[in-house]
Amino acid sequence: MIQESCILLYNASIVSSDGVRAGAVGIRNERISNVWYAGDDGTVEFGGKHIPAKELPSAFLEMYPGAEATDTAGKLLMAGGIDAHVHFREPGLTAKADISSESSAAVLGGVTSFIDMPNTTPPTVSAARLSEKLAIAEGRSYANYGFHLGATNNNSEEIRALAGSEDFAGIKVFMGSSTGNMLVDNDSALKDIFHIKGKRVLVHCEDESIIRENMQKAIERYGEAIPFRAHEEIRSRRACIRSAAKALEMAIEYGTRLHLLHVSTAEEIEMVRAAKQINREITAETSANYLWFCDSDYDTLGSKVKCNPSIKTARDRDALREALKDGIIDTVGSDHAPHLESEKLRPYLYAPSGIPSIQHSLPVLLTVAQQEDIPVERIASAFSEKPAELFGIKDRGAIKEGYYADIVIVDPECRFTPVRDDLRYKCGWTPYEGAELKGKVDTVFVNGKKAVSKGRLTTEGPAGNKLVFKN
Ligand SMILES: [Zn+2]
């Protein structure tokens, strides 16, 4: 017989994109069975009758002996995070990270679903590679898992044929170079991909020719001893702007469902704002890294904050925070991109780009929200609801009856500082070590199973399911 599980979370402050409301949530097995909001008369409906809201826990325990009732007073209860931009390095790069290690860090950070990028080894650029990756993740992931397919100069036909599949989320395009090997630099291939209907096209925008030119100048100036601060000049704002302009222009012309990834400049925000007026399917992402760090951090953190696109100025960071508040930024992905510390300790030219961050992206968002007066409902939208909507993830991304019980409970007042011993990343480091954060993940449910309790992993083990993408 299957063990029935029955949980009540009461005295909850339930956050959704509509606001924060007092209520209670019931979980039966893997789904949310009930969401109660007290009516004007202070009662809730339970077992066919109206009872005072404060009597709900005792009535619940009476009806379901053996159930668990948890008081969540003072905390915020939100749908678990859906991080549509991670690099978990498997297959092929498992010395840096793997699906098991990084997904356990994800749930500790309140992320209950992730979508992994295709720049693994081998890259995920065909149906066969996608099947391999799905098989690798099965039974090993602490969070629900899904994958993007990568576009190349010559796989648009295969991707078009797969566009109706529920097995992958979106199509990742590197317009410009990155650490992967999937640069699409052929305009006719790009056009074919932007014409594909049915899946969202996710674009990394940095113009390769501008970067090469800047790199040449930096080498002439510094030789091999390029300071990390120069990263912002090499992978410059102009490289981002030119590439994003091209992507937005094409998305307008072809009606593409474009998702502009990791926006890092104030100028791109204004371009996205204008482009959205013409093509409502255009959306934009940033990551916690760009909301938290700025160019002055290169002096203290060096290669630890080297990522692509580069971290820009404090002015850009402020503009990104404002865009998160006003909704021009639709989603926040972590762009979790681990490398070994020994690799990061190399000189500029040899240190790989990428930041491990998924365990702290929600606390960073909550901290920024409190600093900038960004309503917490904007965080619920960008962290969970909008990603579910953009990728057609069924029955996840909101606290609703019938949805999967992917839930994160945070203490918004708890101040803490990430320390190395608490990191679950296989690489064992992050530039957020020592950061002063306010807003700590307390409890996390994945498919109704308690994955995190009092900020610690439970013994529940991997409970993640394969995500289903309905568009
Ligand atoms: Zn990325």
Image (tube, rainbow, N blue to C red):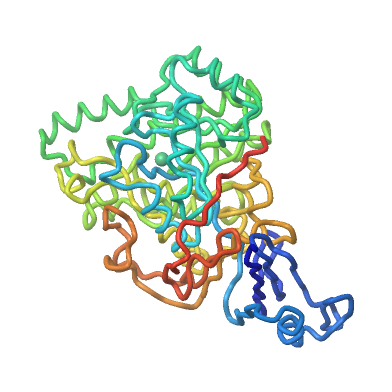
Write the residue at 43% across / 14% down.
Answer: 186
In terms of depth relative to the viewer, which is nearer, 8 or 459? Answer: 459
The residue under the point 46% across, 76% down is 454
Find residue 220 and report its image quarter: top left
Q: Looking at the rendering, in which quadrant would you find the C terminus?
A: top right
Q: Is residue 318 above or below residue 375?
A: above
Quadrant where ligand 1 appears: top left
Q: In the displayed structure, would residue 31 be above or below residue 6?
A: above
Residue occupying the point 27% across, 53% down: 427
Q: How many marks?
A: 0
Q: Please identify the residue farthest to the top as the structure is shown.
A: 188
Residue 244 image point, x, y percent: 48, 31
* Quadrant hosting residue 109: bottom left
The answer to whether residue 375 of the structure is visible from this angle is: no
Depth check, front residue: 371 or 432: 432
Residue 211 picture quarter? top left
Q: Quadrant of the N terminus?
A: bottom right
Q: What's the residue at 45%, 14% (across, down)? A: 154
Task: Pick the residue in front: 298 or 459.
Answer: 459
The x and y percentages for residue 82 are 55, 51
Horizontal side of 208 relative to 373 (left or right) equals: left
Image spot of residue 22 (x, y percent)? 71, 76
- Relative placement, left or right, of 133 versus 159 is left
